[in-house]
Amino acid sequence: MGNIIEIKGLNKIFRSKENDVQALENIDLSIEEGSFVSIIGGSGCGKSTLLRIIGGLETEYEGEYLFDNAPVKGPSREKGFIFQDHRLLPWLTVEGNIRFSLPKDKKKDDELIRKNLELVGLTGFERSFPRQLSGGMAQRVAIARALANKPRILLLDEPFGALDAITRMNLQEQILKIWHEEKITMIIVTHDIDEAVYLGGTVVVMTPRPGRIKRIQKVDLGTPRRRTGTQFTIARDEIYKEFFSDAEIPIEYNI
Amino acid sequence: MKKGLSYWLIYLALPICILAVWEGFQIAGKLKPYTMPPPMTIVETTLDYIKNGKLWENIGISFIRVLKGFGAGLAAGFVIGILSALFPKFEAFTELVIQILRPIPPIAWIPLAILWFGIGEESKVFIIFLGAFFPIFLNTLEGVRNIDSRYFELAQVYEVPKPLLIWQIVIPGALPSIMTGIRLGVGNAWVCVVAAEMIGAVSGVGHMLSDGRSLSRPDIVILGMLIVGVVGKIMDDILRLINKKLITWI
Ligand SMILES: Nc1ncnc2c1ncn2[C@@H]1O[C@H](COP(=O)(O)OP(=O)(O)OP(=O)(O)O)[C@@H](O)[C@H]1O
Ligand SMILES: [Mg+2]
């Protein structure tokens, strides 16, 4: 398959009266359609900025960015975006929130809503309000909402950052399952090395000030993926080294 | 606090004390009937007014005036508030006039209103309109402005058309603030109707007040004041209930 995303020599500077912040410097990145890419890096290295540019939420930058061989003018349904907060409208039910997001001709499609709630394991919560859901459930509704709009690409900005470890692993499994079934290109931003390695077939490592891509690493954990075992450990160590010099790697990571 | 017996005891303690002290002054012979009648006289006057139908008539007349003025104030405050919040150009266009008019108390408009409309219905409704408009307008504007901008970003991602955006994000998002404006507006409207009726009217609760004064009947004045207080409280209770039923998501 071809590349759905082509970024060449992209620079992003946030200008203000006091100072300019170079959030991204000379980014080159191609993403193949149907792949799963993780972007990892410390706080402030421009991960969110890069994802927002890809999603069309940020349209001022220098350099080239093509989505499906065409420039991007703004956000759209085909570029699904999962924010760190679930961003459900508190005055609408789960069902209402999904309906709200749908195009006009699909608004009455109850079957579409039902199917996507089933996909994230939330059958039976159609009439619940966001305040009645846990953080993990709310984030799953946000995912169902994005999927119901049949995006070509799903962009996830630290979607599980605020969740506990167990919920997090559950959602990682669900996201992988959805990726297998729906064959949507996915890009996840995270600062959790394990998450990046477990989910991404490609891991993009970024460093801050200015935000740059330091390394792009392929990961093959086989199918199905496993969180333990040599392949996982090796891949994780490789990424770890990008952040710390060898001497600093804690013993437990040196297998 | 759970509303058990002890709650109601505490709730009613102060009014009962006030009545007791009032009655005490009467027993001690300190009250003059032409300035301050005893509680019993107020009760008798109330029963008189109920019997001859003047109680409901006056309340009804004032209430209808409040409804008219408040309705107009609500419609104008809501629409202009939403438009000002959504379209900066519209806000700039109206801002100076609104800001200069806002500090003028509605009561200060009474002389001009009487010159313009006479002492008929229109002048009262106009004063009430002014009283209701500003709090509703200002709270609608603030309410829309304070909506989390992240919801608008969400709407962009899902290509939500403008009418739907207003209906499903702007209005519900601003609703708590709009309801605050409505409660303030109703309170203001009630103040304004009494003021307007005291100055120029031949009916209504405000007229009862001025009538009582010119007849040297403090019992009628006090009854009028109690009506204003009680009706005002009931209206606020109703609005609080509506608020609770309407805004279930907080
Ligand atoms: N709207 C903005 N205006 C000005 N500067 C910004 C803006 N958004 C981001 N920045 C700056 O750009 C840099 C990159 O920010 P970004 O949010 O992309 O980082 P991040 O990698 O997502 O960090 P985190 O892991 O903390 O979310 C930071 O230095 C930040 O201060
Ligand atoms: Mg970020």
Image: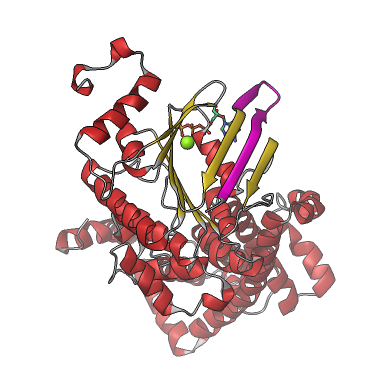
Residue A230, compared with residue B137, is above or below; it is: above
Task: Pinpoint residue A225: horizontal percent, then vertical percent.
Answer: 26, 46
x, y (%) of residue A47?
A: 50, 35
Residues shaded magenta: A3-24
Left-right relation of B221 to A245: right
Is residue A21 in the magenta section?
A: yes
Instruction: Please name the residue shown 28% across and 16% down the image.
Output: A249
Q: Quadrant of the C terminus of chain A?
A: top left
Q: Can residue A61 be seen in this view?
A: no
Q: Tell me, yes or no, if residue A171 can be seen here.
A: yes
Let me know if residue B185 is in the magenta part. no
Extreme-top residue of the structure: A247
| Near-viewer residue (A172 or B232) | A172
- Tell me if residue A64 comes above or below residue B195 in the rendering: above
- Residue at 56%, 64% (x, y): give it: B171
Q: Which colour scheme is used?
A: secondary structure
- The image quarter containing residue A114 is bottom left
Residue closest to the eye, B194 or B222: B194
Residue occupying the point 31% across, 68% down: A118
A169 left or right, relative to A161: left
Q: Whole-percent x and y of residue B17?
A: 28, 56
Name the main secondary structure of what is drawn in magenta: strand
Compare residues A19 and B62 and report the one nearer the observer: A19
